[in-house]
Amino acid sequence: MDIQQFRYGADNLGYLVYSKKFSIAIDPGASEDMVKFAKAKNIPIDIVTNTHTHADHTQGNNALLKKTNARFIDCTSLSHGQILDLKDGTGIEVMLTPGHTMDSLCFRGAGFVVTGDTLFNATVGNCFSGDLESFLNSLKLLMTLPGDTLVYAGHDYVLEAVKYAGIIEPDNPDLSGYASSYNPDHVVSRLSEELKVNPYLRFDTLSMIERLKEKNLPKETQLQRFSSVMEVF
């Protein structure tokens, strides 16, 4: 199993997860580039699906379906723990992660996770659902993955996110190294790195709790701390 990242629009990122004989397109805004890549690899595109139903993630669905014999799987029909088979003994696991939207989900593969607008590199998505508790639980679920898991997000907001993380935690020593490793041609980070720099995952760290104390923000529970970071910073 492997994964290829495709940039489209101003900062959107889509993915092709593939084996030697099968592939799954996720958020296929770059439909033409995906087709060219699949032809070069001599593999069909078999499934088209999405991380959630926002238009910037679904806009390439019809174009890719017209260019291929792929079948469409509505992401809202997927269930937690469901496996999308890659026909070589491997597959990607569906993780329901409501928060950004209530239909948001992630796809976990061998050593990576495609996170859509739930978890970005160095930040997280807006909570358009209004359900911060569900969003917190979704992020906590992702945080249980192995530290070397590669995080492939739905947008490239890295440079802006690192600057903002520096405002939230100005004394965080890991931010400069994280920023220096940024590659716009391959936007990715390890979960272990996110836990060090992403302020929206650091609601239990002593430095973040002290920061909230300085700002006189609610901090007694995980949900209070997460909500304080999300709503104030």
Image (spheres, rainbow, N blue to C red):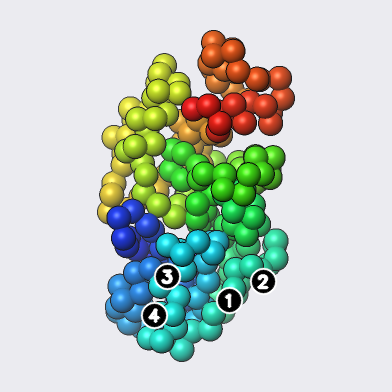
Amino acid marked by disc 4: Ala
Amino acid marked by disc 1: Ile
Q: Nearer the viewer, residue 62 or 144?
A: 62
For the residues marked 1 and 4, what is the alpha-carbon distance in whole angstroms? 15 Å
Examine the rendering and report whether any part of residue 203 can be seen. no
In front: mark 3 or mark 1? 3
The residue lying at 37 percent from left, 33 percent from top is: 162
Of all residues, the one furthest to the top in this rendering is: 214
For the residues marked 2 and 1, what is the alpha-carbon distance in whole angstroms? 7 Å
For the residues marked 2 and 4, what is the alpha-carbon distance in whole angstroms? 21 Å
| Residue at the disc numbered 1 | 73
The residue lying at 46 percent from left, 64 percent from top is: 55
Q: Secondary structure at mark 4?
A: helix
Percent of width and height locating residue 41: 34, 78
Q: Are marks 2 and 1 in contact (CB under 8 Å)?
A: yes
Q: Nearer the viewer, residue 157 or 111?
A: 157
Percent of width and height locating residue 124: 50, 42
| Residue at the disc numbered 3 | 59
Q: Secondary structure at mark 3?
A: loop
Amino acid marked by disc 2: Ser
Amino acid marked by disc 3: Gln
Percent of width and height locating residue 150: 47, 49
**Residue 140 location, quadrant:** top right
As drawn, the label of residue 77 is 2
The residue lying at 55 percent from left, 33 percent from top is: 230
Percent of width and height locating residue 212: 57, 17
Q: Residues within 10 Å of mark 4 (few under 14, many from 20)?
A: some
